[in-house]
Amino acid sequence: MTINGAWIIGGGIVALAVCGTLILHKTPIGEAIHRHIADRPRRRMFVAAVSFALTFIGLRLLTWCIHNNIGPFHDVQMAGRHIHHMVWGILLLLLVGYGWLADVGTGQGDSSRLMSRLMAILYGAAAALTLDEFALWLNLRDVYWAREGRSSIDAGIIFFSLLSIGYWGAPLWQHILRLRHK
């Protein structure tokens, strides 16, 4: 039996969303994060960074298995055309963006802590799906395993760093902004 990458990626994202949300909402870990990271945007950045890292690493492992014919995994093909996982990432980014436009998980109105965490998990996963194929954006051809494909890893490291800087540096940035407005 062969399993194409879409089923693995889709199942992985669903598992990440469900398990991540349950861990963050039903275990002491979630309460500890809520207590020790008091600022909601920082919590979302932290959760998105973890989700991004797990998804990015999982994608690299899956594509390596497909590339080396390990396991029953294969690329997604539709009418003879390879559908890259960046497509699923863009669609998921659009969905999360729409959700945030509608104040789902933002902390505004009736938005819940559960939805905030879920949206952050999905955002991190969607960003990983998209940035893992950043080299395809630049070259407009599949260079995933070529030398030019390294730019996807670089883009992932830069994005993860930005999420981390936003999380770790938030108190500093807030202090700097307060100083400028005095």
Image: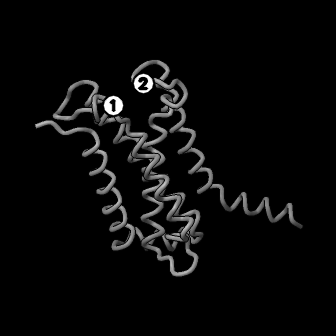
Tell which tag, 2 or 1, sits nearer the viewer. Answer: 1
| Image disc number at residue 104 | none
Q: Amino acid at mark 2?
A: Asp
Q: Secondary structure at mark 2?
A: loop
Taking the spot 55% from the left edge, 71% from the top edge, the residue there is 103
Depth check, front residue: 166 or 32: 166
Q: Left of 28 or right of it: where is 135?
A: right
Residue density around tag 1, few if under 14, some if 14–19, many if 20 or more, within 10 Å: few
User: Which picture quadrant has residue 22?
Assistant: bottom left
**Percent position (x, y) of residue 73?**
21, 35
* 130 to 28, vertically: above or below: above
Residue density around tag 2, few if under 14, some if 14–19, many if 20 or more, within 10 Å: some
Q: Amino acid at mark 1?
A: His
Q: Secondary structure at mark 1?
A: strand
Q: Which residue is mark 2?
A: 142
For the residues marked 2 and 1, what is the alpha-carbon distance in whole angstroms? Answer: 10 Å
**Number of marks:** 2
**Percent position (x, y) of residue 82?**
33, 31
Pick out the residue farthest to the top: 147
* 36 to 161, vertically: above or below: below
Taking the spot 73% from the left edge, 63% from the top edge, the residue there is 174
Pick out the residue farthest to the front: 79
Depth check, front residue: 50 or 76: 76
Pick out the residue farthest to the right: 182
User: Which picture quadrant has residue 4?
Assistant: top left
**Percent position (x, y) of residue 88?**
39, 45
Task: Say if mark 2 contacts mark 1, CB within 8 Å.
Answer: yes
Q: Which residue is mark 1?
A: 82
Mark nearer the N terminus (2 vs 1): 1
Taking the spot 56% from the left edge, 80% from the top edge, the residue there is 109
Taking the spot 20% from the left edge, 29% from the top edge, the residue there is 70
